[in-house]
Image (cartoon, helix red, strand yellow):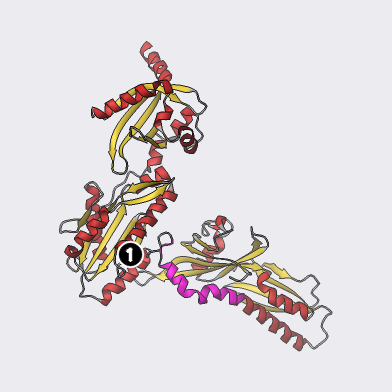
């Protein structure tokens, strides 16, 4: 890119998600629509379908810049325009005017370039100016989008030629400057139009179609071959919230990318692949029927799927529903609803499966509590942890805020570091053998619940007497897992002794 262009950005829905170059611009990803400094003018550009410029402002890389934001509109399946987001270029000033500035200096001119603060404002802000005074300058006005710009120029030694000649020179130089600016703006709005259209149809995380891109491509494919048979599949990650809540959204993104990569590697090159949003993905296979792809889809569903977390592979699973056109659907929208009904049926019957649509299935509302796992665990009336039940390699997965507070650990990272992610290291050493034997006796006897009294290691190395109420469950991801609630032994005895004494 030119030295005068600081960055080019994409902002779907007004939220900056992609910045080129990424290095040095990590903190620039913001919500333009709701930002206090950029919101009003960005909303104006969106609502009035016009390019807007904002600045100058200080760049964190040094110097000053101007933001040129171009609102992008696409058409939905009904042919109606909708706001996709912004394409943006950040121009360095006065670098972008360097050629014109040099020319003006060489010819002995003083200059000033100003613009209005906003399309609705009459107040001008100076963008750049020369060092000397402007005496009786010639002024030339122009607009970019709906904002007014003003370029003023005068010879260093005052006007010596006729006013007409001076005016012609001034206008000529102003037009040169205008073309210098617009050349950069067109870099975004015209020369890269095809690239931005591709990006508008592509999911930035997984590099496959986004929902709009998939729907448009599927519609075209089916319209082009109305008599052909198609199979559409919808799939999502089982318990995806669990991945985000336990490992964090960064690792959830890894799972999504790995799933998309496995789809690209498994399905033929002519298959349409898309991400509907969240953890839901879609597939369209052409010139085929459900019976033809049944084994293929079942095989893909059962293939191991993993993401890497702290050097270890973590497994996750998917559910998939699919349907056939025109056997059960007369158009693309109906076909996707049938696939969704099959996916919903899988969710109702234990997840981690693959099912074809059949008559009688209905796409239901996927009921959820409305609480994320972390929200619930943080408000449990007690200290809570989850760990993998393994005789030799038990592993701590999660601790809620109450547990960290009770034991004095600053956060889960400190807990994992000081315990080496092992539940065994939370038990006082002289009790470890006895407590572990008791735990495994519970497991071997098939008891789901048990109570154990022991001393729990705190962050400062001291120990707290606790009652451990543990429940063991089978997890698809990890095998046997313990959910454990802790109560302070001394506080519990004091509380209940006081209760009984009354």
Rendered residue at 43%/28% (across/down): 426
Q: Find residue 242 and report its image quarter.
A: top left
Answer with left or right where residue 65 lies relative to residue 70: right
For disc 1, the marked residue is: 273
- Give above or below for 163 relative to 342: below
Residue 36 magenta: no
Residue 497, image x and y in percent?
A: 38, 14
Q: Find residue 174 and report its image quarter.
A: bottom right
Q: Which type of secondary structure does the marked residue at label 1 adopt?
A: strand
Residue 50, image x and y in percent?
A: 53, 71
Answer with left or right where residue 85 lies relative to residue 66: left
Residue 359, image x and y in percent?
A: 15, 59
Q: Is residue 63 visible?
A: yes
- Give above or below for 405 relative to 39: above
- Give above or below for 439 relative to 166: above
Quadrant of the snapshot with the N terminus: bottom right
Q: Which residues are magenta?
A: 181-204
Quadrant of the snapshot with the C terminus: top left
């Amino acid at each position: 890119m030119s030295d005068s262009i600081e960055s080019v950005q994409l902002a779907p829905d007004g939220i900056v998600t992609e910045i080129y170059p990424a290095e040095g611009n990590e903190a620039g990803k913001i919500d333009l629509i709701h930002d206090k400094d950029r919101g009003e003018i960005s909303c104006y550009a969106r609502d009035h379908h016009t390019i807007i410029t904002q600045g100058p402002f200080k760049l964190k890389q040094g110097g000053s810049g101007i933001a040129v934001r171009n609102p992008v509109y696409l058409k939905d399946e009904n042919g109606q325009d909708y706001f996709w987001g912004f394409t943006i270029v950040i121009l360095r000033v006065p670098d972008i005017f360097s050629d014109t500035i040099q020319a003006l200096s060489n010819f002995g001119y003083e200059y000033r370039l100003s613009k209005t603060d906003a399309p609705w404002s009459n107040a001008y802000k100076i963008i750049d100016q020369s060092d000397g005074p402007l005496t009786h300058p010639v002024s030339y006005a122009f607009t970019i989008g709906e904002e007014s710009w003003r370029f003023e120029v005068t010879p260093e030694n005052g006007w010596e030629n006729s006013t007409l000649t001076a005016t012609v020179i001034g206008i000529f130089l102003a037009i040169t400057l205008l073309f210098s600016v617009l050349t950069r703006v067109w870099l975004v709005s015209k020369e890269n139009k095809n690239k931005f259209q591709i990006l508008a149809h592509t999911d930035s995380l997984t590099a496959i179609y986004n929902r709009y891109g998939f729907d448009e491509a599927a519609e075209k494919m089916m319209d082009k071959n109305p008599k052909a048979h198609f199979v559409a599949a919808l799939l999502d990650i089982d318990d995806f919230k669990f991945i985000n809540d336990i490992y964090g959204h960064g690792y959830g993104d890894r799972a999504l990318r790995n799933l998309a990569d496995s789809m690209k590697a498994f399905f033929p090159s002519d298959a349409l692949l898309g991400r509907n949003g969240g953890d839901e993905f879609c597939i369209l296979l052409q010139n085929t029927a459900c019976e033809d792809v049944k084994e293929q889809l079942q095989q893909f569903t059962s293939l191991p799927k993993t993401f890497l977390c702290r050097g270890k592979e973590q497994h996750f699973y998917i559910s998939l529903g699919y349907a056939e056109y025109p056997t059960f659907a007369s158009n693309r929208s109906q076909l996707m609803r049938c696939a969704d009904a099959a996916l919903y049926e899988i969710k109702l019957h234990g997840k981690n499966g693959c099912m074809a649509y059949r008559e009688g299935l209905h796409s239901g509302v996927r009921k959820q509590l409305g609480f994320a796992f972390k929200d619930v665990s943080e408000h449990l009336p007690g200290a809570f942890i989850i760990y993998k039940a393994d005789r030799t390699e038990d592993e701590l997965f999660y601790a809620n805020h109450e547990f960290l507070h009770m034991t004095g650990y600053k956060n889960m990272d400190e807990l994992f570091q000081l315990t080496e992610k092992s539940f065994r290291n939370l038990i006082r050493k002289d009790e470890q053998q006895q407590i572990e034997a008791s735990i495994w006796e519970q497991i071997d006897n098939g008891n789901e619940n048990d109570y154990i009294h022991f001393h729990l290691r705190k962050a400062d190395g001291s120990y707290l007497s606790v009652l451990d109420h543990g429940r063991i469950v089978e997890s698809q991801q990890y095998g046997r897992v313990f959910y454990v609630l802790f109560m302070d032994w001394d506080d519990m005895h004091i509380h209940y002794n006081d209760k009984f004494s009354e």
